[in-house]
Amino acid sequence: MTLSDLLDEAAAFDAEYAGGLSNHLPMALLALARLGTTEARLHAFAQTYSRRLQPAPPHSPWPAGVAWAARLGERAAWPEYRDLFFDWLRHEHFSEVLRQALPLLMQGCGAAAFHGLIRTAYALQATRRQELADALAYW
């Protein structure tokens, strides 16, 4: 499996597991790939790491007419935020989405030990729309 395939599969997992630990799978896969590991090793790592993860909740559309910042900080809103950001990224270039979203998201950049910010940086390197949506949703 390629890195791209593994990142697609990683999108099936929740951003957190075991009561609040951050899912590092997408970031670790990209880091390992950048370090030059083999596809076989990437696949083995993904299989081992994913055993501890929980499935992502079902996709849920953002409520029509609700301002996108209305539920910031609500862990339960992650499914709606990941759909909102995914749709937003389908319609606007990632740089425009970041230009609009980051000023508000940066107010909470330290939440979850900076993992939203860190995951966003990795998502930009991976150039995967779903991963960037999930990262922004995690803020």
Image: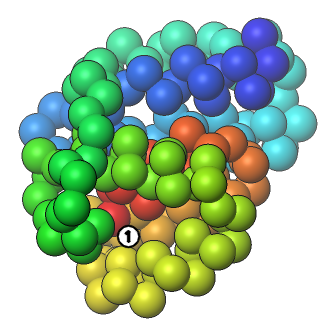
Question: In this view, which residue lies farthest toward the front?
Answer: 65
Q: Closest to the observer: 126 or 99?
A: 99
What residue do we see at 55% from left, 39% from top?
Answer: 130
Q: Which residue is drawn at the image coordinates 53% and 11% (left, top)?
A: 47
Residue 131: % across, % down: 55, 43
Residue 111, given in percent of the width and then of the height, sits at: 25, 71
Whether residue 28 is visible, yes or no, is no
Left or right: where does residue 134 sit relative to residue 75?
right
Q: Which of 139 and 28 is in front in this view?
A: 139
Image quarter where the C terminus lies is bottom left
- 63 vs 91, left or right, is left
Residue at 35%, 85% in the rendered image:
104
The amino acid pointed to by label 1 is Phe
The way the protein has been coloured in the rendering is rainbow
Residue 116 image offset from top left, x and y in percent: 40, 62
User: Taking 123 as reference, is 116 left or right?
Assistant: left
- Secondary structure of the residue carrying tag 1 is helix
Q: Report the number of discs.
A: 1
* Residue placed most toward the observer, 139 or 100: 100
The residue beneath circle 1 is 114
